[in-house]
Amino acid sequence: MATAKCTATVTAQTVVAKAVPRFVWQRAGLVPSLILGATFFALAWVSASSSLTNALARRSPEAAAQLWPANGFATASAASAILAKANAGRDGTAKLTVPTAVRGLAERAILAEPASVQGVRNLALFHQANGDNPRAATLMRLAVRLSARDTAANMWLVEAYLRGGDLDRALTLIDATLRTDTSAGALLLPRLAQLLEQPGAAPVMRGLLQDNPPWGHDYWSAVIEAGNAPIQAADLRGSLHRQGVPLAAGHDARLIEQLVEAHSFAAAFALYNQVRGAAQFPPIDWKLADGRGIAVSRSPDGTIRASALSGSVGVVAQRLIALPRGRYTMHIESSAASGQLVARLTCAELQGARTLAVDIPITQNTQASFDQTTACRYAWLTLSLDPTSTQADPSITIGSVSLRPAAGGA
């Protein structure tokens, strides 16, 4: 019995002795496994919390900041929500309102996430509202360095540069913004178009546009829509044409119309000659009538067709021509019968003063000469239905119209 008990004890000790190293090894391997598992769990929790926080930040920034205070982006969004609420309904001239809470949230956002552009921008706005514009400008420049696509910071700096008279830096920043953020065009291009009337803007714009930037076409659309500086725009386009920069002809045509409407005839003809090629007596293209009882159309070959109700009178088509002093011969081919159509020349300058008045009745093939002895440099050439016409529902085709110096003329 004693022998069996002793044998069992030795066997148990041997088993335990053999088992200890394996148990110790298992414990040693279990510790890093537990640590690694805990780490993955923590990362999963952080990721899930951050995702939830980011989702809340888009809907309820204040709740997101409370749920996960260490998320700098959520804290910055909370500050932005407070800013938006404090300035609801504010126009561009009213003073910016920035509650004190915005500063604390902005600083927390930057501490938690130094790359939070929104946090830096909010802190800049706080300093602006409290009269510290130099610090605000420094922070806005930092925001732009953190993200060149932050349109709000870019716009703030653009306005700051303009207020300081630094037009070159303002336009350069606008160019950089438009190249990196296409959505910024809706805000920046109208502003850029308005700047053209400022002294010194044209040379800087020429430098930006001569490389044919991707926003160039939209810029000219904004300039035409603004219509505030047609002469400056024409000078700028003329310079770019001379440099061989590709420009849409449609913008030239609309700009010429604006120059004519503003009675800037010399500028209109200068641009017209540059686009179409110089002519001795160049005309600005026909403007067709849109009057009551008269329908006018123009075919691709330039032929004008006019149809009218019986007894209708008025302008069929009109164009501006350069007409210095001299003797001229006008030639018009048309289907008009006698008494139906008249060509009329009147001065376009001096607020419509009749320093020039020439009427030429038009028949099928009309050629007439006249003298221009007045000080008028530009004239309206108007084709009109003659009130003496009695033909029922007249329909007229007008082909070529030419104006040349008369043989032996001055």
Image: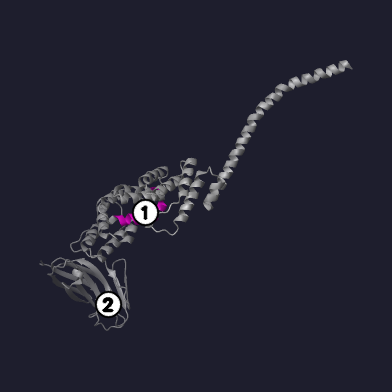
Give the residue displayed 71% in from the left and 23% down from the top: 22
What span is in magenta? Answer: 179-195
Q: Is the stretch drawn in magenta largely helix, strand or loop?
A: helix
Residue 157 percent across, percent down from the top left:
36, 48
Q: How is the image coloured?
A: one colour
From this view, report whether residue 47 is shown above or below residue 352: above
Q: Is residue 168 left or right of residue 369?
A: right
Secondary element under disc 1, as helix, strand or loop, is helix
Query: Image quadrant for the C terminus?
Result: bottom left
Label 2 is placed on what type of residue? Gly
Mark 1 burial class by Cα count in 10 Å: few <14, some 14-19, many 20+ = many
What's the amino acid at mark 1? Leu
Q: Quadrant of the N terminus?
A: top right
Q: Is residue 85 magenta?
A: no
How far, Cα to Cα, is label 2 from label 1? 44 Å
Number of numbered discs overlaid on the protein picture: 2
- Disc nearest the viewer among 2 and 1: 1
Q: Which residue is mark 2?
A: 314
The reply to whether residue 151 is visible in this rendering is: no
**Image quadrant of residue 221?**
bottom left
